[in-house]
Image: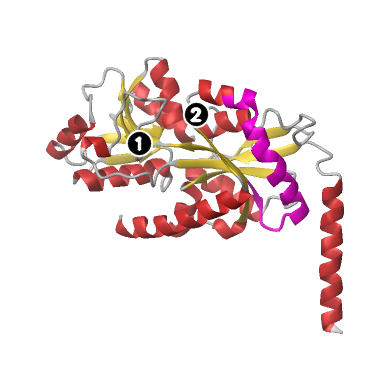
Amino acid sequence: MRKLLAGAAMALMAVTGAASAQGYPDRPIMMMVSYGAGGATDFQARIVTMTAGNEDALGMPIAIINKPGAGGRVGWNWFATQAEADGYTLAAYNVPHFIAQSIKGGVQYSADSFEPIANWGADPAVFVVAADSPFNSMADVVAYAKENPGKLTFSGAGLFVGHHIAALQIEKAAGVKMSYIPTKGGGAAAMKAVIAGDVMAGVNNLSDAFRAREAGSIKILGVADLERSSFLPDVPTMKEQGLDVDNSSVNYRGIMVPKGTPQAVIDKLAEKVPEMFRNKRVQSKMKAGGSPILVMNRDEVKAMWAARQKTLEKLLAGL
C-alpha cells in the first residue's frame, strides 16, 4: 500500500509539473542579481535578457532585481532558501564565487542547491590602478609590496569571489603581503574605490575595467587568465609577467533556478535561454561593453560547475 501511495504521489508530481510548464511562461519572470546596479553582472544580465519577451524566445520579459551584500552571499542565501521553485524566479550565478563561498562555509547554499540553465560569459580578473598611479606593471606593484609589507591596499567585490581568489594567487605567486579590502556593492563599488584614490589598486572584472579604461579613469596592468584577452591585446597576462597565476578566478556568469523547479520548466528554459544569449543584438551590445561571451548549454554548465568544485577545493586548501 505504501509503495502504491508513493507511486501515485510521484505520478501526480509528474503530471502537475508537466501541466505547470504547458503554458509556461504566462507572466513576467524575475531574475535576481546578487550584486549592485551598474556592476558587470548587473550590466550584462540586463543585456542578455533584453530579448526574453520576443516570440522566438520566452515570450515574456525578464525583470532584474538586485540583492547585493557580502560578496553575493545575501542574494544566493535568499535564492536557496526563500525563492519560489516555479520558474518565475531565476538568478544570475557567478562561478567561482558561490562555489568558493560554499567551500569556505558560513552560507546556506552549495552547487546542489541550484539547477543551472545556461552560461552567457567568462570574464577574467584584472589588476587595475588609477590613471595617475606611479605603477605601470605588475613588477612595479610587486616591488612596492616587497618594500612595504601589508601597506599596498587594493579593492575587490568581496570575500572568496573571483577578485579575492586572484588576489590570493597574486600574493602567493609574488611572495608578498598586500591588504585586500572587500567593498560593499560589488565590482562597481570596488572600481570607484580605485578611481577615487581610496585604495592604491584593485582586482576587478575585465568588463568593468574595460569601460573604466575607455573613460580614461584607470590603467590595467595584468590579466589573470591563460591568454591575453582580445579586448585588451596590449595587456599581458600575470604569467607573462612572471607570476604563476592561472585562470581559476575567471568569472563565469549565467542563469540558474532553485532546486525543485519542475523538470519541464527547466527543459523549456534550457532550450530557449542559450538562443537568447546568441541573439545578434545581444552579442553586439556585449561586445561594445567589453564583456566576453561564452555561451554554454545546461550540460556544459553542469560539467563546468563540477570541474570548478574540484579545482577550488584544491586551490583554497592551498591558500
Is residue 2 visible in this depiction of the protein?
Answer: yes
Q: Main secondary structure of the magenta part?
A: helix
Q: Residues within 10 Å of mark 2 (few under 14, many from 20)?
A: many
Please name the residue shown 37% across and 25% down the image.
232
Circle number at residue 315? none
The image quarter containing residue 32 is top right
- SS type, badge 1: loop
Please name the residue shown 36% across and 46% down the image.
165
Image quadrant occupied by the C terminus: bottom left
* Relative horizontal placement of residue 88, taking residue 94 as reference (left or right): right
**Lower sequence index among marks 1 and 2:** 1
Measure the alpha-carbon separation of dots 1 and 2: 16 Å
Residue identified by numbered label 1? 227
The image quarter containing residue 49 is top right
Rendered image coloring scheme: secondary structure
Is 262 inside the magenta-drawn segment? Answer: yes
| Residue type, label 2 | Ser
Please name the residue shown 53% across and 54% down the image.
303
Q: Position of residue 282 (x, y in %)?
A: 62, 26
Q: Position of residue 305 (x, y in %)?
A: 52, 53
Give the residue at the far bottom of this rendering: 1
**Residue in the foreground of this view, choosing between 314 and 176:** 314
Residue identified by numbered label 2? 291
* Relative horizontal placement of residue 267, taking residue 141 as reference (left or right): right
Give the residue at the far left of this rendering: 147
| Residue type, label 1 | Glu
Q: Position of residue 1 (x, y in %)?
A: 87, 84
* Relative horizontal placement of residue 146, taking residue 8 as reference (left or right): left
In the displayed structure, 163 sits above or below 309; it is: above
Q: Nearer the viewer, mark 1 or mark 2?
A: 1
Q: Tell me where the magenta segment starts and ends, as one range.
A: 256-283
